[in-house]
Amino acid sequence: MGQRRGFSLFIRTPINEDPTHRLTPPSSAPPISFSEVDEPAAPAKHAGCCSSGNQAWMHGGMWPRVLLRDGRAAAGGCRALLSRFAVRFSPPWSTGSDSPLRSNLHGTATRAFPLIPIVVEQTGRGERAYDIYSRLLRERIVCVMGPIDDSVASLVIAQLLFLQSESNKKPIHMYINSPGGVVTAGLAIYDTMQYILNPICTWCVGQAASMGSLLLAAGSPGMRHSLPNSRIMIHQPSGGARGQATDIAIQAEEIMKLKRQLYNIYAKHTKQSLQVIESAMERDRYMSPMEAQEFGILDKVLVHPPQDGEDEPELVQKETTTAPADPPAPAGT
């Protein structure tokens, strides 16, 4: 038995391979998870496994390579090694009806795993590895990227509450690049932003559309920013209903309530009248950062934050047009 110790895991992907790998587990693969375990012995040869470079192939499926906290590879990611670890989570190849996985013609589930960069820091106690989002969280940075649904809302809310528990005075920076999403999920994030005591700096990177624009506008006054080439879009909520006439009427009444609720939120943060908000959101309204600043959705359009020796960040100024000068009069003859 080796010394009992904790460890960190991440998936190493071959450089010249497609990052969307298919994972095909054995038909009776048990639920697995990783926790603190005994340090494994030296790698051993196993039938059916061929390890090469940064990957380990077994029975047609690619298993993640396991790295201990000190960076040493552990047994090439073989199934025999995985069986030595404590197990506590269900694998992502279950094929329930609500699963995001797709089943192929042979009945085995496949899933593409996103690539998440890993940051390794040197500390007095050795190396420490973080995924990039956890490392940014240490700097009080929260990323709202992609469509906003209940899963994204849960993660963002948890991060906001955690940062408030650490300090309710230090600002939180929220970077938004979202096409929008579910209204109730977005409102859950919005209410949490208003609930916590921290000032919240919002930053639009890429786009802030639909619920994304509402979260951008919900930042603390004077702390709502955008980069110069971002796009902002506002519109009224959309949805659909089916069923009996009474059920459709109930859903229609609910979406009208949400519409009025969203209008009031935009009016509160933009300082525009309800009439202006209703007119602007009747159809998709796209804005440049400067137009969104004039509308009241954001406060500043930044090129970059303050550099060394600068007191203020570089801002994008509104372009002013001047009338061309009159051409000189022709000389008299």
Image (spheres, rainbow, N blue to C red):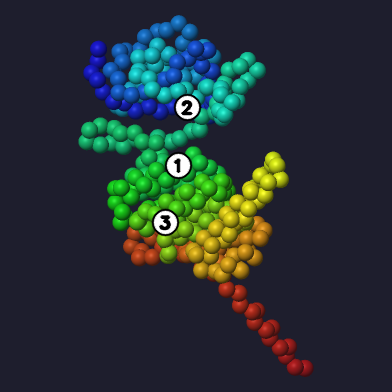
Q: Secondary structure at mark 2?
A: loop
What residue appears at the point 42 percent right and 45 percent down from the top-left corner?
157
x 77%, y 93%: residue: 333
Residue 121 on image: x %, y % = 31, 37
Q: Which badge, 3 or 1, comes first in the chain's sequence?
A: 1
What type is the residue that disc 2 sits on? Thr
* Residue drawn 24% across the image and 20% down it: 4
Count neighbours of disc 2 (C-alpha within 10 A) and say few if under 14, some if 14 to 19, many if 20 or more: some
Query: In screen coordinates, is 193 left or right of 61?
Result: left
Q: Quadrant of residue 117?
A: top left
On the question of residue 139 being in view, the answer is: no
Q: Nearer the viewer, mark 3 or mark 2?
A: 3
Judged from the image, the secondary structure of the residue bearing numbered disc 1 is helix
Q: Amino acid at mark 1?
A: Ser
Disc 3 or 2, which lies upstream in sequence? 2
Q: Which residue is mark 1?
A: 154
Kind of residue indicated by mark 3: Gln
Q: Which mark is residue 13?
A: 2
Query: Real-space Cα distance between discs 3 and 2?
Result: 40 Å
Residue 190 in percent (x, y) is at 47, 53
Local SS, label 3? helix
Between 299 and 15, which is closer to the camera in this rendering? 299
Frontmost residue, 131 versus 275? 275
Crowd class of label 1 (few under 14; some 14 to 19; many from 20; radius 10 Å):
few
Up/down of 75 relative to 225, above or below: above
Of all residues, the one furthest to the front in this rendering is 246
Q: Can you give x and y, in whole percent of width and height, for residue 153 in the image?
A: 47, 44
Disc number placed over residue 194 in the picture, else none: 3
3, 260: nearer the viewer: 260
The mark tally for this picture is 3
